[in-house]
Amino acid sequence: MTTPRWDPDRYLRHAGHRTRPFTDLLARLADPPGDRPRVADLGCGPGNVTALLAGRWPTARITGYDNSPEMLDRARADHEGPTAGGGRLDFAHADVRTWTPGEPYDLIVSNATLQWVPGHADRFADWTAALTPGGALAFQVPDNLDAPLHTLLRDLVAAPRWRTRLAGAVRATDSVHAPGFYLDRLTRLGCAADVWQTTYQHVLQGEDPVLDWAKGTALRPALTALADDPEAREAFLTEYRALLRTAYPGAPYGTVLPFRRLFAVAVKPA
């Protein structure tokens, strides 16, 4: 798949909607063991949700990991440093595909990242093995590849005009597994697993807001592939915009984007 170049400002344009699933995940987590828990955030992006971890556990030592220099620069500038309770929030470069804990962790979380990591479920064994007794692995991922947002993008990328140039510019249809798959995999690793789905009805504002949303995430590989050809980039966006306008018509109060997400919390026995 085309490695996307991330834009923190673009991603944060819908920060309220994008953050809500993480706060819902956070609400399902018990306090980690110990007075000064060690926490990892895999795929921390611009660090805005990593900062929520510091708000919840101000004594924790928290590291956000990401492989995007742009995202890490923004995270460090906005959030790095000591926390109110004497903990520490910092950020480091790492690739989630190969990251292996170098020390015990009380909590490993990941927010809207694992869908970009082929074979991510194969990493669960290493991650849960590094958890302290009573520690948890928790993540949420978009689970809406059957939505028009993605089906129209896949169809467009496969069209004759774009299929060669944009080969590998969309996520694979198996990039997220069924809930039962995650429940089985995590339970077989000896954890007490809780897996669920939630469909949010995001009401977006502005002109072509679903396209604007996609520019921050799903479109990043395609936009990266077309970055050296502004004319082709605009032509592609024009075609996709027209498709999205039909699929997601506006209403007087805004444009509704239904968005299903999958959540999992796996707790290691104490």
Image (cartoon, rainbow, N blue to C red):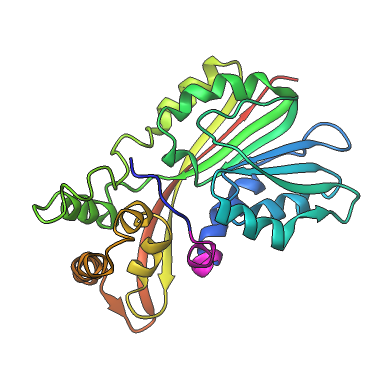
Which of these two is toward me, 185 or 50? 50
* Magenta range: 7-15
The answer to whether residue 20 is above or below residue 242 is: above
Q: Residue at x 52, y 24 (%)?
A: 123
Residue at 73% from the left image edge and 58% from the top image edge: 79
Relative to 188, 77 lies left or right: right
Give 241 or 198, whichever is nearer the viewer.
241
Residue 48 appears in view:
no
Task: Give the left or right position of residue 115, taking residue 55 as reference.
Answer: left
The answer to whether residue 250 of the structure is visible from this angle is yes
Question: As rendered, which of 184 and 156 lies closer to the eye?
Answer: 156
Q: Position of residue 109 (x, y in %)?
A: 62, 39
Q: Quadrant of residue 229?
A: bottom left
Is 81 above or below relative to 64?
below
Q: Is residue 13 magenta?
A: yes
Instruction: Look at the image and say whether residue 145 sits in the magenta stretch.
Output: no
Position of the N terminus, as image quadrant, is top left
Q: Is residue 151 above or below residue 137?
A: below
- Residue at the far left: name it: 160
- Give the percent coordinates (x, y) of residue 23: 62, 53
Give the image location of residue 74, x and y in percent.
63, 60
Seen in the image, is 198 located left or right of residue 56?
A: left
Residue drawn at 28 percent across, 39 percent down: 173
Task: Identify which residue, 197 or 39, lies in the foreground.
Answer: 39
Rendering quarter of residue 190? top right
Q: Residue at x 69, y 22 (%)?
A: 130
Could you say where residue 6 lies in the image, as x and y percent from the top left? 47, 56
**Total labels drawn:** 0
- Residue 257 lies left or right of residue 235; in this view the side is right
Q: Main secondary structure of the magenta part?
A: helix
